[in-house]
Image (spheres, helix red, strand yellow):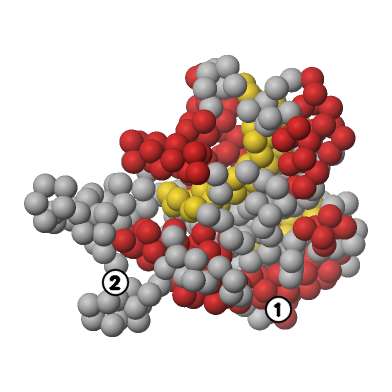
Amino acid sequence: MSNTYAEKNIATRAIHAGQEPDPTTGAVVPPIYMSSTFKQDGVGGLRGGYEYSRSTNPTRDAFDQQLAAVEGAKYSISFSSGLAAIDVLLRSFLKPGDSILLGNDVYGGTYRLLSKVFGPWRIGLDVLDVTDTAAVEKQLQTKHYAVVWLETPSNPLLRITDIQAVAQASHQQGTKVVVDNTFASPALQHPLEDGADVVIYSTTKYIGGHSDVVGGAVLLDDDELHEQVAFLQNAAGAVPSPFDSWLAIRGLKTLELRVKRHSANALALAKHLEQRPEIERVWYPGLESHPGHEIAARQMHGGFGGVVSVQLAGGMDAAKRFVASTQIFTLAESLGGVESLIEHPAAMTHASVSGTALQVPDNLVRLSVGVEGEQDLIADIDQALDNLSN
Ligand SMILES: Cc1ncc(COP(=O)(O)O)c(C=O)c1O
């Protein structure tokens, strides 16, 4: 990995790291290496180490170098989805009999993977409110966990966990800490600096940034764990295509610009929503009313992200009518793209946690606030809320 840009500003790293102009033609944007295999100069005579694109591909490498530089991590390994990244990371170091301590507010698909797929392979799973640092310390003293897994801000309730405090308590017990940093993105938060062992992303969200590619990444500094993850990725095969990697590269270049605007729009909308009588509660870490605001203000740098969740005073029925009434916000799963999205987690992204300790309120609506004009977004939400009383 090139360290040329290590000391530079995050936007400079995002635009230049791993993106040297093509040495043959001078193309300023490196080409997409749409090739599954590479010619050898005699058996084993690899050019630049490339042999077969499940193992390594130049476009994927360019993305890995770029994302590692943006994160300030030694290594980035990209995957074909966020869940593929989570799956391979955990299988690279867990063994039957190990246990995971999971935050009680995470993406439904993460919980489904850990409970329904890992469970039958004898990986234990306990769920805890990891925003309560004292409870985490206590739990870690009563039982050994191979890993604490958390999201901050979490999906969909935007809960905030003190990464430094959890990392300190975990390391005392020989437990690794993984932070799913998808909501904050590397533009706002650096869990490795705060003591986490591994960061994972669904690059489908803010890193890709345009809702046109599904991907994931594992970021870490540890040489041995990097070897294990890279080995399993090659052995099992969940790699992103060269074209997917190129889309992610293109998205990441403008991450910092976009996330600033997402955060500003989300804060303005969250403040506005607090004034509306149809809204029972607004969840946004940038609001002083948020229980994790002080930690978020210390731990996140330059904004609080683009996701806002609200609970409707009129219950589930009002929530369902609200998500169906917006015109600029599109009713769809996912988040982190330039366009605003709205969804009903209990029936959509978090349907798989129904009846578990992670169940989400059925009057909850999650908004992924895009980078459109702030006043247009506020007006759209206002007309949808006005509609509820008609
Ligand atoms: C916080 C978080 N982590 C992981 C994932 C899974 O990522 P993917 O959909 O790219 O597999 C998601 C998807 O919504 C997510 O929101």
Residue in the image at 37% along x and 52% along y: 240
Residue in the image at 31% along x and 61% along y: 58
Q: Position of residue 350 (x, y in %)?
A: 62, 42
| Amino acid type indicated by mark 1 | Glu
Q: Secondary structure at mark 1?
A: helix
Q: Which quadrant of the figure contains the C terminus? A: bottom right
Identify which residue, 378 or 5, lies in the foreground.
5
Tell which tag, 1 or 2, sits nearer the viewer.
2
Q: Position of residue 185 (x, y in %)?
A: 62, 60
Q: Which residue is mark 1?
A: 374
Relative to 273, residue 234 above or below: above
Query: How many residues crowd around disc 2 within 10 Å: few (fewer than 14), some, or many (20 or more)?
Result: some
| Amino acid type indicated by mark 2 | Pro
Residue in the image at 57% along x and 30% along y: 114
Identify which residue, 91 or 282, lies in the foreground.
91
Sooner in the amino-acid sequence: mark 1 or mark 2: 2
Contact, mark 1 vs mark 2 (Cβ under 8 Å): no
Q: Which residue is mark 2?
A: 31
Relative to 222, residue 68 above or below: below
| Left or right relative to 98: residue 60 | left
Query: How many residues crowd around disc 1 within 10 Å: few (fewer than 14), some, or many (20 or more)?
Result: some
Pointer 1 residue Cβ closer than 8 Å to ligand 1: no
